[in-house]
Image (cartoon, grey):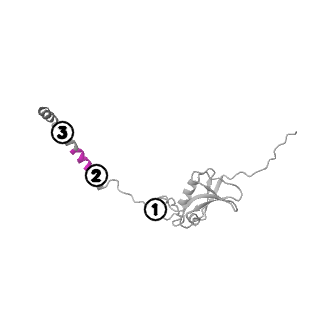
Amino acid sequence: MADEEPSKVDLPPPPSFLEVTCKSSGRKTRYAVGTKAGFAVNLINRKLDVGRPLALHIEAVKEGEESINFGPDAVLVDYGNGWKLQTVTEVDYSEGLGKGERVPLAPGRIPGVESSDGTHRRKTVSKPGISFVYMGKILLAFVLIFVLGAIFTLALENLPRLILFLNSSM
């Protein structure tokens, strides 16, 4: 038997990134290989304009094949030719439900993040660190501590008389 070398086929190197298409905005975003799906969905939802449906999760789709869904802790994977990664939105999910079924609530927007075009920045209202109610509660706590201290002081000062009274009456 002669030693046969396996035939070497030049395969193109796998891409160093994955593209995910957002159904709401139509934009493609690129992620490093090994990115978790939950992180990608979070970033995609941050970039959506106000009023667009949020992405619920990411799925891999191919014509004639059943889709593959990625959970929040799953690592995004490129399945090869014909497969593409895309988001599933609230609208897509509710269209697939039958009558009488409830649409699950999607996670809310992340506060303090602006949309992709730089508009709709969330306004932050700072609360004062110390309010009059806060100062009143502190003052009431001090008063109660001093009243409780006075009660214990009076009780301890009169304890010997109470002991003598109890001993003499027995």
Q: Amino acid at mark 1?
A: Arg
Foreground residue among 146 and 70: 70
Q: Residue at x 56, y 61 (%)?
A: 55
User: Taken as a whole, is the magenta stretch helix, strand or loop?
Assistant: helix
How crowded pointer 2 is (Cα within 10 Å; few <14, some 14-19, many 20+) is rated as few
Q: Is residue 19 left or right of residue 99?
A: right
How far is mark 1 from mark 2, CA to CA?
A: 32 Å
Q: Position of residue 63 (x, y in %)?
A: 69, 62
Residue 137 has which mark?
2
Q: Position of residue 135 (x, y in %)?
A: 28, 52
Q: Is residue 95 left or right of residue 82?
A: left
CB within 8 Å, label 2 to label 3: no
Front disc: 2 or 3: 3
Q: Which residues are magenta?
A: 135-147
What SS does tag 2 mark? helix
Q: Amino acid at mark 2?
A: Lys
Q: Amino acid at mark 3?
A: Ala
Front disc: 3 or 1: 3
Foreground residue among 32 and 164: 164
Q: Position of residue 85 (x, y in %)?
A: 64, 58
Placement of the C terminus among the 4 image quadrants: top left
Foreground residue among 10 and 99: 99
What SS does tag 1 mark? loop
| Image quadrant in which you'd find residue 78 | bottom right
Placement of the N terminus among the 4 image quadrants: top right
Q: Which residue is mark 1?
A: 122
Q: Which residue is mark 3?
A: 155
How far is mark 3 from mark 1, CA to CA?
A: 58 Å
